[in-house]
Image: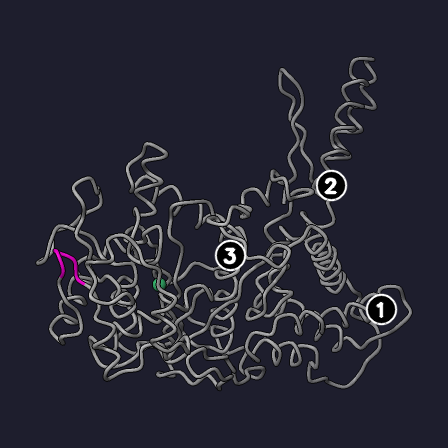
Amino acid sequence: MSNNNSNERFRKDIFLHNSLTRKKELFEPISQEVVGMYVCGPTVYGEGHLGHARSAITFDILFRLLRFNDYKVRYVRNITDVGHLENDADNGEDKLAKQARVEKLEPMEVAQHYTNSYRAQMAKMGCLSPSIEPLASGHIIEQIELTRQILDKGLAYESNGSIYFDVQKYAQSHRYGELSGRNLDDIISGTRDLDGQSEKRFSADFALWKKASPEHIMRWPSPWSDGFPGWHAECSAMSRKYLGETFDIHGGGMDLLFPHHECEIAQSTAAYGHSPARYWLHNNMITLEGKKMGKSLGNAISLTQFFTGDHKLLDRAYSAMVIRFFILTAQYRSTLDFSNEALIAAEKGLFRLLSAQEALHKLDKSQITGHKSQNELLNKCLEAICDDMNTPIAIAHLFDAVKTVNSVVDGKEKLSAEAISDLRMAFDLVLGELLGISTQEGVAASGGADEALGGAMELLIEMRSEAKKARDFATSDKIRNSLAEVGITLKDRPDGTDWELKK
Ligand SMILES: [Zn+2]
């Protein structure tokens, strides 16, 4: 958990774009000791897709950067397992309940299944685990308490057993729309007229508590009705529980900025007088031919499909590290357009960087002697990452250094031992520690190496089996032993031969 101070001499000020002020600001934590960061996690009713990956990776970079700067970070990322309805206007079926009906499962079985797969996929993509991953369904009491406080302040009302936030009344003394920059008239004109809206006094009001219909499975008792919390309530209640009424950073995808985060600010302000977080950060979307990708839009490719290549839009499979690297080739606030060409380019780029890193570790140190350097490459990369997580600039600096590494490897250029050790340190810290690219998985998967190795192994196993059939044991043993020398073990089974690469 604790960091040593070895990075101290490279530490720099961090600047972050704050959606609340629409400015890039110097990051100044409330406490020098612990930074509190809350990020909206997934609604666990379906497979993880690129959008999930981009959000998790964006805030993983920030988590890593803060830790690099020797902060202790409490990183809370919630799991939404109740209350997220099919549309954002408090209507339609609960997303989880609907999936459970389709899959003929208990809603909590659906939640467990997709929570497990989300965690496994994010780990595979090199994301560190958050410090706390609270479930919405485990914090019903806190959400009821928040609702009660807002009712007590007169900023919510009961209607047929449901409780709604009174946006109009709130807007008389506060600015509803301060995060999204929308004014109330725009918000009203953007609100669709939907069935059941008659329960609300005003179209922009949102549910804090919903009375459950008789067939609704996920329900809890409350002072008002048997029901379930409104979607926005969980993040206000859980961030307050684990990070306090004022914490440093609140993050999420840009699609959550309105209404979700706007409602969170209104809820906290109504309950205890101010916005919960100081810095609001939003990552942009991943598009496909310029259009948003999403489950509800029917053009989403799941992460599993990326890993297997099993989707009509994919030319082939891509490794988790290639997807991570692809995401980091754009600054998190820019849109990123997906294509097979872009992923293949990312794969080639990653392979070049990892090969250079590997070469640096093998380079002979006894080159020429030189004066002590300031590790210019590391400083430049850190400056870029500290500048609102400008990862593409950091990556560009690494690519520039690859040229130097390659000419040293080719013997065209000579560097001092210090310069080589600086380069090595910069690659290890930037690529590994800060960008979170793990070498083993990255190298094995880059450049289609997996596929090529599989094909070569098939051929060798066949040659060995033919040699054995011809009783040419010298050849068959030679194949087995030579493979063992490079770390590949063959295992004979009654129906054939398997192979295993020792890492
Ligand atoms: Zn949230």
Residue 140 in percent (x, y) is at 20, 57
- As rendered, which of 189 and 237 lies closer to the eye? 189
Circle 3: residue type: Gly
Q: Which mark is residue 398?
A: none
Q: CA distance from mark 1 to mark 3?
A: 40 Å
Precedes in sequence: disc 2 or disc 1:
1
Location of ligand 1 given as a quarter of the image: bottom left
Q: Which-is-in-front pick, marks 1 and 3?
A: 3
Circle 1: residue type: Val
Q: Residue at x 56, y 74 (%)?
A: 389
| Residue 409 falls left or right of residue 143 | right
Name the residue carrying label 3: 51
Q: Is residue 454 above or below residue 173?
A: above
Name the residue carrying label 1: 408
Name the residue carrying label 2: 486
In the image, farthest residue toward the left: 223
Q: Residue at x 75, y 59 (%)?
A: 352
**First to last magenta residue range:** 159-163
Q: Which-is-in-front pick, marks 2 and 3?
A: 3
* Ligand 1 neighbours mark 2 (CB distance < 8 Å): no
| Total marks in image | 3
Q: Is residue 39 magenta?
A: no
Q: Is residue 334 above or below residue 380?
A: above
